[in-house]
Image (cartoon, rainbow, N blue to C red):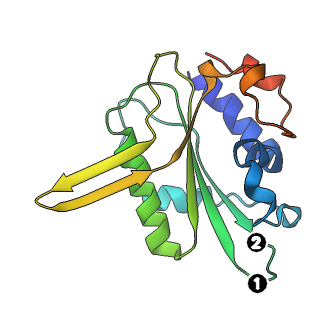
Amino acid sequence: MIKLDIIWKGIIEDLPVYFILFFFPQARQPLNLDRGVEFPDKELEALYPTNQPKHPHFVDKLLKVYTHDGREEWILIHIEVQGYADPNFSKRMYTYFYRLLNRYQKPVTALAIFTDRQPNHQPNHYEYNFMGTQLYYQYNSYKVAEQDEATRPAKTPLPWWCLPRLKP
């Protein structure tokens, strides 16, 4: 799965605007993608340093994009590419979210891309419930193995030919 993760990292870094518009077709409205995309990945590492996990994740990406309103307002897009089942994955997604939101006080959206072949494995939320305190965090998710031409988002600029090749 590491090879697929590296390919996804290349797509994200080399085609960030196309990548954003493929997974977030509604992004043209709030985002000024002509202004460019920044990759403050070191910030992500500082928020959640890894301590040699059993299955290291190689493609945690953080994208910084700007809005159309002319201000120095920006949002963060947190992307995780996951090639194996991890029981703590959803909690990690939530942890990144709240740490990014707390640190920057900017809008944050998150996307998990699953590259494994396990059927019915596509987590998209984290739940917490303890003594009357409840939390439900939902994030965007995409399962590569379940996609084909019929599920392709309309009018996407991301070259569709690359997605079947990225299936595990």
Determine the residue located farthest toward the bottom in the rendered image: 71
At label 2, counting other C-alpha atoms closer than 10 Å, the crowd grade (few under 14, some 14-19, many 20 or more) is: some
Query: Badge 2 is on which residue?
Result: 67
Left or right of residue 110, residue 119 in this image? left
Query: Badge 1 is on which residue?
Result: 71
Name the spot of residue 8 as percent of width and height, x first: 68, 33
Left or right of residue 131, residue 65 in this image? right
Q: Nearer the viewer, residue 28 or 16?
A: 28
Can residue 84 be seen by looking at this rendering? yes
Marks 2 and 1, how far apart at CA = 8 Å
Q: Is residue 125 above or below residue 84?
A: below
Q: CB of mark 2 within 8 Å of CB of mark 1? A: yes
Name the spot of residue 33 as percent of width and height, x first: 83, 61
Residue 154 placement: quadrant: top right
Left or right of residue 86, residue 9 in this image? right
The label number, if any, that marks residue 101 in the structure image: none
